[in-house]
Image: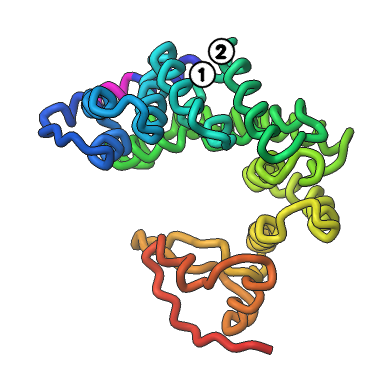
Amino acid sequence: MQNLFINLILVFGLLLCQSGNAQETTYSLSTADSLKAAGNLKMALTVYAKLYSEDSTNFKVNYNYASAFALNRQVDSAFHYLRISVAHDSTLTPLTDPAFYYLIEDARWKTLQDETVAKVEAKYGKYENLPLSKELWTMKLKDQAFYYHYHLVEKQLGADSPVARAIWELKAKINEENINRLVEIIETEGWPKISVVKAGAASAAFMIIQHSDIAVQQKYLPVMRTAAEAGEASWHSLALLIDRVNIREGKAQIYGSQIKRNNDGSYAVEDMIEPEYVNQRRKEVGLGPIEEYVKRWGIVWTVVQKEK
């Protein structure tokens, strides 16, 4: 079933690419990135190739070139340019980048992962539980996979199209696998602690829990709260989970993170307690002003803010 969904995605991906082939090429990184974002991978790869020929050491060119190859399922080329880019990088970014979903089952991924971790540990210190960190990074990558494909299909065919539904079914399967494994981890080892797996891996637990059903969220919200109170989980992530659970339980949210879509297609902030104090509450957990947050949905926040 999963292969069927992936094949459907690939077929429509090719159609999307073909629809943009008439675009005139401009040799700039921003143009290549825009072509990739629009689903025109064939033309994006052409532009990246030109940019690479002009500067083969440019980190962003190599990295974005690799991600385009990966999205196009050209695995060998993706690994080639990814290895060039990570040679000049000491971050974990590629290990959680959903663009590289089709690389993670390849034996070369483990080698790249080990080499990347070695550089990060040399610069920032050892991981207390490296195997768990690695597993959480991969779970985080999987959690975010296929949003790229979904948004392309949504724009071209609509959210109710058969392909869009197939992608959501695939994502639901991935989410279920992630949630089941995370529950096993929490039940045996507790909530993944920042001091043990570090912040990037610990954030995967929140991302996966927020995509679970309400019963799982209700069960593990107190566990995450205890971890946050001990400095072992992110307060701003906890705030988002609190809001999500409140809304799903029919209660008002606290931090204004949950957005609803109206029948006319516009967006609005879900019901909230004392909206005039929301920025004070958001600041306390490390979240930015709500007026900035809601702009991404075209919402203009007009409630005058106060402090207690």
The residue sitting at 19% across, 24% down in the picture is 18
CB within 8 Å, label 1 to label 2: yes
Q: Which residue is mark 1?
A: 103
78 left or right of 187?
left
Residue 34 vertical placement versus 64 (above, below): below
- Could you say which disc has been placed on residue 237 in the image? none
Q: Position of residue 44 (x, y in %)?
A: 26, 29
Q: The residue under label 2 is which amino acid type?
A: Arg
How many neighbours does mark 2 have within 10 angstroms: few (below 14), some (14-19), or many (20 or more)? few
Indicate the amino acid at tag 1. Leu
- Image quadrant where residue 114 sits: top right
Q: Position of residue 306 (x, y in %)?
A: 59, 88
The residue lying toward the viewer, choosing from 225 and 4, is: 225
Give the residue number, with chain letter if any, for mark 2: 108
* Residue 209 falls within the magenta-colored stretch: no
Q: Main secondary structure of the magenta part?
A: helix
